[in-house]
Amino acid sequence: MERTLAIIKPDAVQRQLVGVLISEIEKNDFHIAAIKTQRLTAAQAARFYDKHRAKPFYDSLVTYMSSGQLFALILEKPCAIKDWRHLMGPTNPKQAEPGSLRRLFAIDVQQNSVHGADSPQTAEREINFFFGEGG
């Protein structure tokens, strides 16, 4: 069994898509091992996205991710990381396959409704951030 972190981002929470997204997660055979809601401070968002610090979108990403409530989830299933990333679709919703969450619900590249870890190491760090000592 593999674990990954999923985030339902502020734009999706504000548009009342949490139930729809959780339903999609469950329809795709993920087990939700934990779920919590919180609003990140700018400092927490900056720490979470620190690997993007040198990128031009970093400041707007930190502002966006601290702009409202989000839901953090620990998802479990065999191949959870790969399967969650496939269900989400690419960061740019215009490049996402029909039926993927970002194609269905994203507003744009930044307000793309959901986040997912990209590797086992990232998943462990991100789960700890929200559900361990970091959260």
Image (spheres, grey):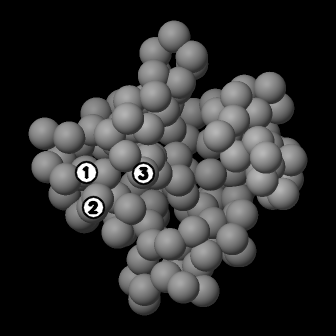
- Return the x and y of residue 9 as percentages of the image width and height: 62, 51
Residue 26 or residue 82, whichever sits in front: 82
Amino acid found under the numbered disc labelled 3:
Asp
Q: Quadrant of residue 23?
A: bottom left
Callout 1–callout 2 Cβ contact below 8 Å: yes
- Badge 2 marks a residue whose secondary structure is helix
Amino acid tagged 2: Asp
Which residue is most to the top?
133
- Please report the residue visible at 51 percent of the width from the left and 10 percent of the height from the top: 133
How packed mark 2 is, by other alpha carbons closer than 10 Å (few <14, some 14-19, many 20 or more), is some
Which mark is first along the chain, 2 or 3? 2
Horizontal side, residue 60 vs residue 20: left or right: right
Image point 44% across, 38% down: which residue? 122
Residue 95, image quadrant: bottom right
Lower sequence index among marks 1 and 3: 1
Give the CA separation, mark 1 to mark 2: 5 Å
Question: For this rendering, which residue is in front, 23 or 74?
Answer: 74
The residue depicted at 42 percent of the width and 89 percent of the height is 98
Q: Secondary structure at mark 1?
A: helix
Indicate left or right for 126 with 38 as reference.
left
Q: Which mark is residue 118?
A: 3
Tell me the residue that label 2 is attached to: 83
Which residue in the structure is indicated by mark 1? 80
Residues at marks 1 and 3 touching, judged by CB atoms closer than 8 Å: no
Which of the two discs, 3 and 2, sits closer to the camera? 3
- Residue 5 in which image quadrant: top left
Q: Residue at x 61, y 76 (%)?
A: 92
The kind of secondary structure element at disc 3 is loop
Residue 38, visible in the rendered structure: yes
Residue 32 seen in render: no
Type of amino acid at the residue the image marks with label 1: Ala
